[in-house]
Amino acid sequence: MSRTHIRDFHGDDLDQLVRLWGAVTDDAQAPIYSLAEVIASCQADHAIVAMRDQELVGAAVGRAAHAQGWIVFFGLAVPDPDGALAAGLLDALERRMAALGLAKLSALVPESQGLGPFTDNAFSVHRSVRYLERAMPVQRRELDTLKEVGGRILPRNLWRKVAGMTQEKTLLEERLVTPLARPDLAERFGVVPPRAVMLFGPPGTGKTTFARAVASRLDWPFVELFPSRLADGGGLAGALRSSFEAIADLEHAVVFIDEVEEIAAHRGGTPPSPTQGVTNELIKQVAEFREHDGKLLICATNFVRALDAAFLRHGRFDYVLPIGLPDADARRAIWSRYIPAEAVTRVDVDLLVEESDGLTPADIEYAARRASQDALARSLREDGADSVLGTTDYTRALAGTRATVSPEAIAEFTADIETLARL
Ligand SMILES: Nc1ncnc2c1ncn2[C@@H]1O[C@H](COP(=O)(O)OP(=O)(O)O)[C@@H](O)[C@H]1O
Ligand SMILES: [Mg+2]
């Protein structure tokens, strides 16, 4: 049998190393370190190969991370009955990496791979450990585009933080989140994932909150376009076009246009209104946007009836969803969010839920903050003497809170649901 020679990796070995990597990684057990990572370590860190007759028959590749070294690849192309080949490779890698002053050398080994080579070389096995990973929502090549369009990744928990609103949440979950997050499931049931939706409802009911929560839930970057700000410098239509062009480079995005009636109100009249060109551009961009997978456009408006009929027409927006005033359950959840845990047992939440009927989440938030501030101020005036936050602080704050949404506006909203909503 010909002699096996163990030596440092050279650039010329790359082809063979890639072949070895392919041969020893199986589909059932996806490798933890991708081939790209292994190659990067070969070039920048430490790699040892075993050669027999010009053939690469084994490799061990390591990476230093501060005081801990990681073996990012270990594989043999030939049988190694006495373990000599494995031991030689691991020894050589360890010697090279020891020069860095590492405290320990670690390896993540797929369940299907034997541990023998490692335990024979004095590695101990940690049985209590499980491996976790998360794919980053934005890849490096998208970072510049994301910055250009002012997009960002939102915190992961925004969906959970939307209190109550069970009906709206269920609807958004079923219509938007699930088909987009689980395209496999959508396809199985013949559901076409939505591309664009319109949220409408009185101000302060949570349209912006829901748009952000959907992005957070999907783990997609959130890109808000501000019609009023887009225009500075050039024309609004051109600015809109270039924003959408940049967004097209992103793999995933939730694009949000708030108060869309500003740029998509009724057109017509002679002479045509100055925003008509902008509305036309937006209609064109929505059509274009609809051509691609993996992105969602959410528009929001307080005045759905003011929107241009062509803009709202079937085929542009998959759904036109009302976001209404919070019901009792939602109000209870919103109150519970803002009443401090310390005070909640003392406060008659049922009463507050009842008295806040007709208020928006934003109104309730305002009343709750107001109650807290007033109670704090009172406690300072009274020099702290047993002053606590109680029900009357809340009812007093409620009495001083004007409902954002008038009864007439509610009547209009109810009529809009009848005529314009598309669930
Ligand atoms: N379901 C909710 N739970 C808790 N807070 C909410 C909820 N909906 C809205 N809010 C709060 O109310 C305020 C206004 O909501 P927003 O989403 O801006 O309303 P809109 O966009 O419909 O005008 C925000 O401060 C938001 O945090
Ligand atoms: Mg808003």
Image: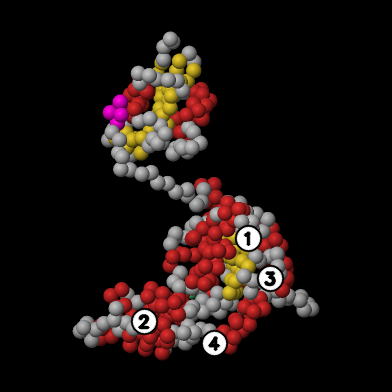
Amino acid type shown at disc 4: Ser
Identify the residue under disc 3: 312
Cβ–Cβ below 8 Å for labels 3 and 2?
Answer: no
Whole-percent x and y of residue 120?
Answer: 30, 26
The main secondary structure of the magenta stretch is loop
* Residue 120, magenta (yes or no): yes
Q: Which range of residues does the magenta coloring cover? A: 119-123
Whole-percent x and y of residue 24?
Answer: 47, 29
Q: Residue 406, labelled with which disc?
A: 4
Q: Quadrant of the C terminus?
A: bottom right
Q: Nearer the viewer, residue 26 or 366?
A: 26
* CA separation in Å, label 1 and label 3: 14 Å
Identify the residue under disc 2: 349
Identify the residue under disc 1: 195
* CA separation in Å, label 4 and label 2: 24 Å
> Between disc 4 and disc 2, whose residue precedes?
2
Whole-percent x and y of residue 325?
Answer: 51, 79
Q: Nearer the viewer, residue 7 or 172?
A: 172
Q: Nearer the viewer, residue 49 or 241?
A: 49
Amino acid type shown at disc 2: Val
Left or right of 100, for residue 267: right
